[in-house]
Image (cartoon, helix red, strand yellow):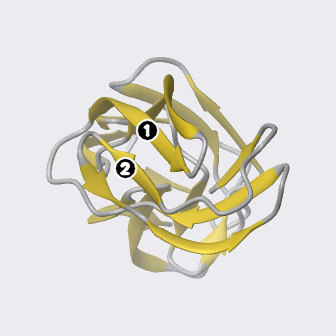
Amino acid sequence: MTINGTNLEGATTVTFGGTAGTITAATGSTITVTTPAKATAGQVAIVVTTPGGSTDNLTFTYTAAPTITGVTPSAGTTAGGAVVGITGTNLDTTTRVTFGSNAVPTLAPLTSTKLAVITPAGSLGLVNVTVTNPAGSAASLAYTYI
Protein backbone atom coordinates (compact mmCIF):
# COMPACT_ATOMS: atom_id res chain seq x y z
CA MET A 1 0.00 0.00 0.00
CA THR A 2 1.15 3.55 -0.67
CA ILE A 3 0.64 6.42 1.77
CA ASN A 4 1.02 9.94 0.38
CA GLY A 5 1.63 13.07 2.44
CA THR A 6 4.33 15.49 3.52
CA ASN A 7 7.32 15.23 5.87
CA LEU A 8 7.33 11.42 5.63
CA GLU A 9 11.10 11.08 5.28
CA GLY A 10 12.68 8.94 7.96
CA ALA A 11 9.42 7.15 8.79
CA THR A 12 10.23 4.57 11.46
CA THR A 13 6.94 2.68 11.77
CA VAL A 14 3.52 2.35 10.20
CA THR A 15 1.01 0.44 12.29
CA PHE A 16 -2.38 -0.96 11.30
CA GLY A 17 -4.62 -1.35 14.33
CA GLY A 18 -1.49 -1.49 16.50
CA THR A 19 0.35 -4.08 14.36
CA ALA A 20 3.43 -2.92 12.47
CA GLY A 21 3.55 -3.11 8.71
CA THR A 22 6.80 -3.50 6.75
CA ILE A 23 8.08 -0.27 5.22
CA THR A 24 9.62 -1.07 1.83
CA ALA A 25 10.30 2.50 0.63
CA ALA A 26 9.95 6.03 2.00
CA THR A 27 10.51 9.53 0.61
CA GLY A 28 9.44 12.95 1.82
CA SER A 29 6.02 12.50 0.22
CA THR A 30 5.43 8.73 -0.08
CA ILE A 31 5.68 5.60 2.06
CA THR A 32 5.24 2.14 0.58
CA VAL A 33 4.30 -0.40 3.23
CA THR A 34 3.17 -4.03 3.29
CA THR A 35 0.09 -4.41 5.46
CA PRO A 36 0.24 -7.01 8.22
CA ALA A 37 -2.17 -9.95 8.15
CA LYS A 38 -5.38 -9.67 10.15
CA ALA A 39 -7.71 -12.53 11.07
CA THR A 40 -10.97 -10.57 10.83
CA ALA A 41 -12.35 -8.02 8.41
CA GLY A 42 -12.94 -4.44 9.43
CA GLN A 43 -11.53 -0.94 9.66
CA VAL A 44 -8.37 -0.14 11.63
CA ALA A 45 -6.43 3.04 12.37
CA ILE A 46 -3.13 3.65 10.58
CA VAL A 47 -0.45 5.43 12.61
CA VAL A 48 2.62 6.76 10.78
CA THR A 49 5.60 7.62 13.00
CA THR A 50 8.44 9.85 11.76
CA PRO A 51 11.19 11.75 13.61
CA GLY A 52 8.79 14.74 13.60
CA GLY A 53 5.94 12.90 15.33
CA SER A 54 2.99 10.63 14.61
CA THR A 55 -0.22 10.92 12.63
CA ASP A 56 -3.32 8.90 13.33
CA ASN A 57 -5.93 10.36 11.00
CA LEU A 58 -5.82 7.50 8.46
CA THR A 59 -7.81 4.27 8.28
CA PHE A 60 -7.51 0.99 6.38
CA THR A 61 -10.25 -1.57 5.79
CA TYR A 62 -9.40 -5.26 5.77
CA THR A 63 -11.74 -7.40 3.67
CA ALA A 64 -12.67 -11.03 4.27
CA ALA A 65 -12.32 -13.77 1.68
CA PRO A 66 -15.53 -14.63 -0.19
CA THR A 67 -17.68 -17.71 0.29
CA ILE A 68 -20.08 -19.30 -2.20
CA THR A 69 -23.38 -20.75 -0.98
CA GLY A 70 -25.25 -21.00 -4.28
CA VAL A 71 -25.12 -20.66 -8.06
CA THR A 72 -28.41 -20.21 -9.96
CA PRO A 73 -29.06 -21.55 -12.51
CA SER A 74 -26.59 -24.38 -12.01
CA ALA A 75 -26.35 -25.30 -15.72
CA GLY A 76 -26.16 -23.60 -19.10
CA THR A 77 -24.98 -24.03 -22.67
CA THR A 78 -21.33 -24.29 -23.67
CA ALA A 79 -21.79 -21.10 -25.74
CA GLY A 80 -21.94 -19.05 -22.52
CA GLY A 81 -23.79 -15.73 -22.33
CA ALA A 82 -26.21 -16.75 -19.57
CA VAL A 83 -26.89 -14.51 -16.57
CA VAL A 84 -26.01 -16.41 -13.39
CA GLY A 85 -26.60 -15.35 -9.80
CA ILE A 86 -24.03 -16.25 -7.17
CA THR A 87 -24.86 -16.05 -3.47
CA GLY A 88 -22.46 -16.14 -0.55
CA THR A 89 -20.58 -13.67 1.62
CA ASN A 90 -18.10 -10.85 1.00
CA LEU A 91 -19.07 -10.64 -2.68
CA ASP A 92 -19.20 -6.82 -2.89
CA THR A 93 -15.41 -6.60 -3.29
CA THR A 94 -15.21 -9.27 -6.02
CA THR A 95 -12.47 -8.64 -8.58
CA ARG A 96 -12.65 -11.86 -10.64
CA VAL A 97 -14.99 -14.81 -11.28
CA THR A 98 -14.08 -17.89 -13.30
CA PHE A 99 -16.07 -20.86 -14.59
CA GLY A 100 -13.42 -23.54 -14.82
CA SER A 101 -10.39 -21.68 -16.20
CA ASN A 102 -12.48 -19.12 -18.11
CA ALA A 103 -12.96 -15.63 -16.65
CA VAL A 104 -16.40 -14.06 -16.87
CA PRO A 105 -16.58 -11.12 -19.28
CA THR A 106 -18.96 -9.11 -17.07
CA LEU A 107 -19.55 -9.17 -13.33
CA ALA A 108 -21.82 -7.01 -11.21
CA PRO A 109 -21.53 -7.16 -7.41
CA LEU A 110 -25.08 -6.38 -6.23
CA THR A 111 -24.60 -6.64 -2.46
CA SER A 112 -22.19 -8.33 -0.07
CA THR A 113 -24.25 -11.53 -0.50
CA LYS A 114 -25.28 -11.40 -4.20
CA LEU A 115 -23.33 -11.22 -7.44
CA ALA A 116 -24.54 -11.39 -11.06
CA VAL A 117 -22.28 -12.59 -13.88
CA ILE A 118 -22.44 -13.43 -17.58
CA THR A 119 -21.05 -16.93 -18.16
CA PRO A 120 -18.10 -17.37 -20.49
CA ALA A 121 -18.07 -20.10 -23.13
CA GLY A 122 -16.95 -23.45 -21.72
CA SER A 123 -16.48 -27.14 -22.37
CA LEU A 124 -19.13 -29.77 -21.72
CA GLY A 125 -19.28 -30.92 -18.09
CA LEU A 126 -19.06 -29.82 -14.46
CA VAL A 127 -16.75 -26.91 -13.57
CA ASN A 128 -15.68 -25.00 -10.48
CA VAL A 129 -17.06 -21.51 -10.06
CA THR A 130 -14.36 -19.43 -8.35
CA VAL A 131 -14.92 -15.99 -6.84
CA THR A 132 -11.89 -13.85 -5.94
CA ASN A 133 -11.56 -10.63 -3.95
CA PRO A 134 -8.49 -8.90 -2.46
CA ALA A 135 -8.57 -11.21 0.59
CA GLY A 136 -8.72 -14.56 -1.23
CA SER A 137 -10.81 -16.96 -3.29
CA ALA A 138 -13.66 -19.43 -2.86
CA ALA A 139 -14.44 -22.28 -5.24
CA SER A 140 -17.45 -24.54 -5.62
CA LEU A 141 -18.25 -27.43 -8.00
CA ALA A 142 -21.38 -25.64 -8.96
CA TYR A 143 -21.97 -25.22 -12.70
CA THR A 144 -22.53 -27.69 -15.52
CA TYR A 145 -22.04 -26.81 -19.17
CA ILE A 146 -24.59 -28.73 -21.28
| Local crowd size for mark 2, using a 10 Å CA cut-off: few (<14), some (14–19), many (≥20) | some
Q: Tell me if 29 is positioned left or right of 74 in this view.
A: right
> Residue furthest toward the front?
52
Q: Secondary structure at mark 1?
A: strand
Residue 114, located in which quarter of the rendered image? top left
Identify the residue position indicated by label 1 in the image. 47
* x, y percent for residue 72: 37, 37
* x, y percent for residue 93: 51, 37
Q: Tell me if 71 is positioned left or right of 80 in this view.
A: left
Q: Nearer the viewer, residue 16 or 37?
A: 16
* x, y percent for residue 132: 47, 58
**Quadrant of the snapshot with the N terminus:** bottom right
Identify the residue position indicated by label 2 in the image. 15
Q: Nearer the viewer, residue 42 or 83?
A: 42
Q: Tell me if 84 is positioned left or right of 95 in this view.
A: left
Q: Nearer the viewer, residue 9 or 20?
A: 9
In percent of the image, x 25 and y 38: which residue is there?
A: 41
Kind of residue sitting beneath label 2: Thr
In percent of the image, x 50 and y 63: which residue is there?
A: 12
Q: Is residue 83 visible to us here?
A: no
| Local crowd size for mark 1, using a 10 Å CA cut-off: few (<14), some (14–19), many (≥20) | many
